[in-house]
Image (spheres, rainbow, N blue to C red):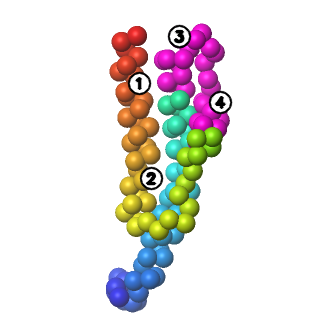
Amino acid sequence: MTRHESGAVITEQEAEAVVGVFLSLLQLALFPVQMVLHGVVVTWLWQWFIVPMFNWPALSIPSAIGLSLTTHYLTGRQPRVGRKTSYEEQLQELLSGFMFAILVLVSGWIVSAFL
């Protein structure tokens, strides 16, 4: 048991429930941000590589978000529902999505400089 600053006693289960709710709300709040970030990354990668190679039109960010959602769905990249993970693993997975998008964008920018 943990004593709250107000003097109330909080059980481990209550503390875990609060952390779980917080992480769920954080994931819900950051999902649109992550979708837009992925859309921006796909838009830039498309502009750097697909447009010059195939002479296809550029993608808007909403089109890139749709393309990203479609490829995730078709390739079976879905959230792991029902798998028990620790809160640290959930937070790490959430942050790694942002870090991977930024890493791909920077890598694409470096490669595009050599084209």
> Which residue corresponds to the image point at 53% horizontal and 58% vertical from the top-left?
80
Given this view, does label 3 or label 4 mark the residue nearer the observer?
Answer: 3
| Mark nearer the N terminus (3 vs 2) | 3
Image coords of residue 26 (percent x, y): 50, 59
Q: Which mark is residue 108?
A: 1
Q: Identify the secondary structure beneath mark 3.
A: helix
Q: Which residue is mark 2?
A: 94
Q: Quadrant of the N terminus?
A: bottom left
| Mark nearer the N terminus (2 vs 4) | 4
Residue kind at label 2, given as amino acid type: Leu
Image coords of residue 107 (percent x, y): 37, 27
Residue kind at label 3, given as amino acid type: Pro
- For the residues labelled 3 and 1, the Cα–Cα distance comes to 14 Å
Q: In this image, 55 relative to 85: left or right?
A: right
| Above/below status of 41 relative to 22 | above
| Mark nearer the N terminus (3 vs 4) | 3
Mark 2 packing: few (<14 Cα in 10 Å), some, or many (20+)? some
